[in-house]
Image (cartoon, helix red, strand yellow):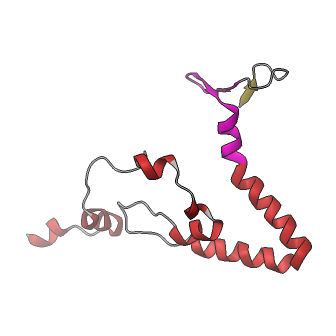
Amino acid sequence: MALRLDSNLPGTFSAEVTPGATRFVHPVEQIQKTSLANQQQLQQFTLNNMFGTHMFLRLQTEQAILSQFQRLPGLQSEFSGLQTMLGQDETIELEDYLGSPMDPVDNVSVHDIMEKRLGVSTLAHRY
């Protein structure tokens, strides 16, 4: 739930109320969170008017296909094809320079993760 502290003054912060604390959100952060959705709405409107509904539906199908590609467990999927299609590969973001906060701190063996996912244990087969 988001509350506006003062909607009459430009450049004011809004507060997100969470069960434990209040987090202040800068207006630019709100714009960044909604920019992709706004771009997709504008693209849908433009494609529908220029080429008809089939063009947007085709792009939507391609996005769905490209968003299904996954890496092995333990490695974060980067969705390079989807980023290229959306034009997000042409900009350098903060995460590209400093690293993503989602990067794992400890190294986990891909084999161990797959064995756990498939319910196979190599220790049980050794004895």
Against 57, is 17 above or below?
A: above
Quick check: is 51 in the magenta stretch? no
Q: Which of 61/50 is in front?
A: 50
Residue 52 in view in this figure: no
Q: Quadrant of residue 109?
A: bottom left
Q: Quadrant of the C terminus?
A: bottom left
Residue 118 in view in this figure: yes
Q: Which of 120/6 is in front?
A: 6
Find residue 6 and report its horizontal and vertical position in percent.
79, 19
Q: Quadrant of residue 71?
A: bottom left
Quick check: is 27 in the magenta stretch? yes
The residue sitting at 25% across, 54% down in the picture is 107
Q: Which of 39/114 is in front?
A: 39
Against 111, is 33 above or below?
A: above
Q: Which of 89/116 is in front?
A: 89
Bounds of the magenta segment: 13-34
The residue sitting at 87% across, 65% down in the picture is 45
Task: Give the left or right position of residue 98, taking residue 120 as reference.
Answer: right
Against 66, is 26 above or below?
A: above
Task: Give the left or right position of residue 21, taking residue 59 as reference.
Answer: left
Find residue 30 and report its horizontal and vertical position in percent.
69, 38
Q: Quadrant of the N terminus?
A: top right
Task: Give the left or right position of residue 99, taking residue 59 as reference.
Answer: left
The residue sitting at 58% across, 69% down in the picture is 84
Q: Residue furthest left?
A: 127
Find residue 90 and report its horizontal and vertical position in percent.
57, 62
Q: Quadrant of residue 20?
A: top right
Against 13, is 127 above or below?
A: below
Find residue 47 and report its horizontal and vertical position in percent.
84, 72
The residue sitting at 57% across, 65% down in the picture is 83
